[in-house]
Amino acid sequence: MMKQIITEEMKVHEEWYKEAEKMTMEKLPKFLNHLMEDYQHDYGTVCHALSAGALATVHAMNESPGARGGITGFQASCIMWEFIRRFNYKNNKCGLRLQDMDNLLYPQYADKFHTISENVWNAVQKEAAERIKQSEAAHEKYENDLEQYKKDVKEFLIDVKQFEAEHPEYPKYEDNPQFYQHIGAGTLEEHEEYQKKVESGFLFEPRKPYDDSAHPAVIAHWLNIMDGKIPFGLRLEE
């Protein structure tokens, strides 16, 4: 069966969301297969397909006998946060907050935009200290790697002369140093050519190490947090 080519501009996904709200366990497998097998997705439509599929699954399960009459609003909130955390924020350490910008229309919600809880602040301070420790360790590793890199380059410059003598088919290093470097980004053809060189035992120039420590401005920000300065003009909840 030929797949239908669709784009976001065609708004086909709007019908998926309507169907998802009325989904049952019996219709769910067919609906999920329909979303993924009947369309040729682009970058945007596949996002709608996955979102509609997830919503359809939740609605179908909520309507099943196993849901014991359906979930409450509080339970729905728990489900939303579990999905957000486990799908998109697995490494979050300090908590998450969803801002409903409609609340800007009501003065009683000012605290939601200007305060953080004490628990969140404690978690932020703890994480700032941990990240400074990790950054210091990363920079120490970089300095050690850099010293080793300098030694490796010296050895390489000696070895490459012998390599050139044994392989006259290759350009000399001094004429084309890039030819002796490991590839980063590149075309498919360039990567295929690089892989042939790797498999042949080619002599590559040592890779320069990367300093994975945080930027000084970020470290300064973390130090301020550790010193008790709450960032961005926020204040603790009273």
Image (cartoon, grey):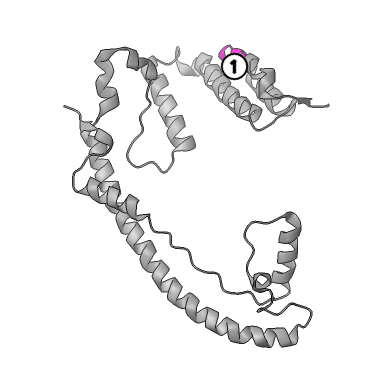
Sort mark 1 into few (<14), some (14-19) or many (20+) by Cα contacts within 10 Å. some
The single residue placed furthest to the front in the displayed view is: 175
Q: Is residue 159 left or right of residue 228?
A: right
| One can see residue 103 in this view | yes
- Residue at image position (45%, 72%) is 146
The front one of 109 and 171 is 171
Compared with 5, 149 (above or below) is: below
Image quarter of residue 238: top left
The front one of 144 and 218 is 218
According to the picture, the residue beneath numbered tag 1 turns out to be: 17
Q: Position of residue 85 (x, y in %)?
A: 43, 35
Compared with 156, 102 (above or below) is: above
The front one of 40 and 220 is 220
The single residue placed furthest to the left in the displayed view is: 238
Q: Is residue 33 inside the magenta stretch?
A: no
Q: Is residue 23 inside the magenta stretch?
A: yes
In the picture, the quarter occupied by the N terminus is top right
| One can see residue 131 in this view | no
Q: Position of residue 199 (x, y in %)?
A: 72, 71
- Which element is circle 1 on? helix
The range drawn in magenta is 17-26
Q: Is residue 144 left or right of residue 231?
A: right
Kindly identify the amino acid type of the residue bearing the numbered disc 1. Answer: Tyr
- Residue at image position (40%, 73%) is 144
Q: Position of residue 77 (x, y in %)?
A: 39, 22
